[in-house]
Amino acid sequence: MNRAFLIEQIRNKKSFLCIGLDTDPEKIPPHLLQEDDPAYTFNKSIIEATSDLCVAYKPNTAFYEANGVAGWNSLQKTIAYIPSDLFVIADAKRADIGNTSDRYAKAIFEGLDADAITLHPYMGYDSIKPFLEYAEKWAILLALTSNNGCQDFQMLDLTNGSEKLFEKVLKVSKTWAEPDKMMYVIGATHPEAFVKVRKIVPDHFLLVPGIGAQGGSLAEVVRYGANDEVGLLVNASRSILYASSGTDFAEAARKEALKIRDEMSVFVDQILKD
């Protein structure tokens, strides 16, 4: 998917919602466990209930890989079921030496036909380059994540307070690809950091986890992180997927997604004025 089409979907749906398909077998509603493929059946219902409210889905591959071949099959079927006008992010957090990254890229972009993959940038450009060689596919680099452990390394001071490690990552990696090929993960739990991020990468899309169950504020993310094309994909997973554990799980998921979409629609109208 190219950048122009993604922005058009944001405009048309008045949404920049990304729904994380982190489907935990232990949280799938009990009545689905008798199905041949409970994870896929669950995901299919979630997609049917929410696809008009979001612009992206983000399956976390770990939740499928943990189940071996059956899990990978569930992931393939899930991605194939997602409508073609939606952006699909494989949340895999890969990157390795060049020839290994080449295989990872082939698995995700050809095997799964995902539009994007999350990557860690700490092995440098040669570990990211294979993912950038696919037309209309995206590399999404971890910059400042939403977990508490981000303080261990990402927030380290490099120059007596004037530059942190995540800022260095942004400054170096932004030279690797144009904003139509690369995005960054910036956690919603660091609203104050978005000002610094936007000074370094004003035009890149940001994938933003951390609202909903993790407590990040959508209003603050938009205030500090949006650009004149919105430039955000804000992810919610657990708050939508597990809004109910009963037979009404899909309806409950839609209700939660609708709340977020309705809040987003106001921001989209403000930013993308005709």
Image (tube, rainbow, N blue to C red):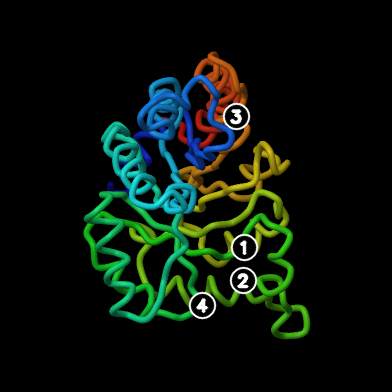
Separation (CA) of disc 3 from disc 1 = 26 Å
Q: Which of the two discs, 4 and 2, sits closer to the camera?
A: 4
Secondary structure beneath dot 4 equals: loop
The amino acid type of the residue labelled 3 equals Tyr
Instruction: Give yes or no for contact between labels 1 and 2 (Cβ–Cβ under 8 Å).
Output: yes
Can you give x and y, in whole percent of width and height, for residue 81 in the image? Answer: 29, 32
The amino acid type of the residue labelled 1 equals Leu
Secondary structure beneath dot 3 equals: loop
Can you give x and y, in whole percent of width and height, for residue 51 in the image? Answer: 40, 26
The amino acid type of the residue labelled 4 equals Tyr
Name the image quarter holding the C terminus: top left
Residue denoted by label 1: 144
Marking on residue 166: 2
Q: Which of the two discs, 4 and 3, sits closer to the camera?
A: 3
Mark 4 or mark 2: whose residue is earlier in sequence: 4
| Residue ID at (46%, 35%) | 272
Crowding near the residue tagged with mark 4, few <14, some 14–19, many ≥20 C-alpha atoms within 10 Å: few
